[in-house]
Amino acid sequence: MNNLDFASSSGLLLVGKVIRPHGLKGLLRIKAYAGSEASFLDAGIVFLRTASGETRNVSVSSVTPHKNIFLMDVEEANSVDEAEAYRGANIFIKKEALTREEDDYFWYELLGLKVYLDTGECLGSISRIIPTGGTDIYVIKKGEKEAYIPAVYEVIKEIDLENGKMTISPMEGMLDLNEV
């Protein structure tokens, strides 16, 4: 069972990966797919799925930014040897543990949305999202063609999760470059 099958069948979301232990006290060096440490802290309990397919739930004590990664302290790892057992594990949280501000959306909610121009024309569906460190880029795919749409208020006019659609008002010349 791959990670996507595991996540969808268990109501979990993939939010990061353990790179390796950090230091001697059992900290985990992690790559976060979530935007901030709040996703891990708000969840309280995360699920670590090792390469062998074993899943363990662990209690998060703290998560702190460190250079371009995060350091996560879990109650179940108090030494480098205990932390080593989690090397390479994927990190999942329960969907219902996620919190968000108004007008915030999670990637899993946006992927697959149909994207329409404010004139009603369908451009295609969001096939992937490219994080850029600043503004995310939504990749809209229709057949073999792709368009790249910046996730900014000036372009994104409405997101209707209930009906599975997004309405955009492209900036002048934006779609000319994309050829959708």
Image (cartoon, helix red, strand yellow):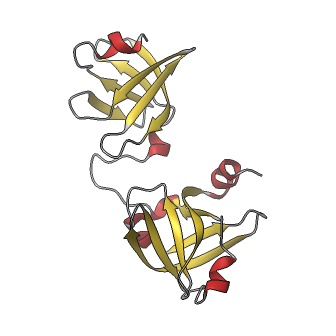
- Tell which of 63 and 163 is nearer to you: 63
Task: Relative to 45, say whether 128 is above or below.
Answer: above
Quadrant including the C terminus: top left
Q: Residue at x 65, y 65 (%)?
A: 89
Give residue 135's quadrant in the image.
top left
Q: Residue at x 58, y 89 (%)?
A: 78
Does 52 sit left or right of 165 as displayed?
A: right
Give residue 12's quadrant in the image.
bottom right
Q: Residue at x 67, y 77 (%)?
A: 84
Q: Is residue 71 visible?
A: yes
**Image location of residue 119, percent across then percent down:** 29, 11
**Image location of residue 157, percent across then percent down:** 25, 29
**Image location of residue 155, percent across then percent down:** 26, 27
Does 49 sit left or right of 46 as displayed?
A: right
**Image location of residue 121, percent across then percent down:** 37, 11
Task: Relative to 166, say whether 120 is above or below.
Answer: above
Give residue 166's quadrant in the image.
top left
Q: Residue at x 55, y 70 (%)?
A: 46
Give the mark count: 0
Q: Is residue 43 visible?
A: no
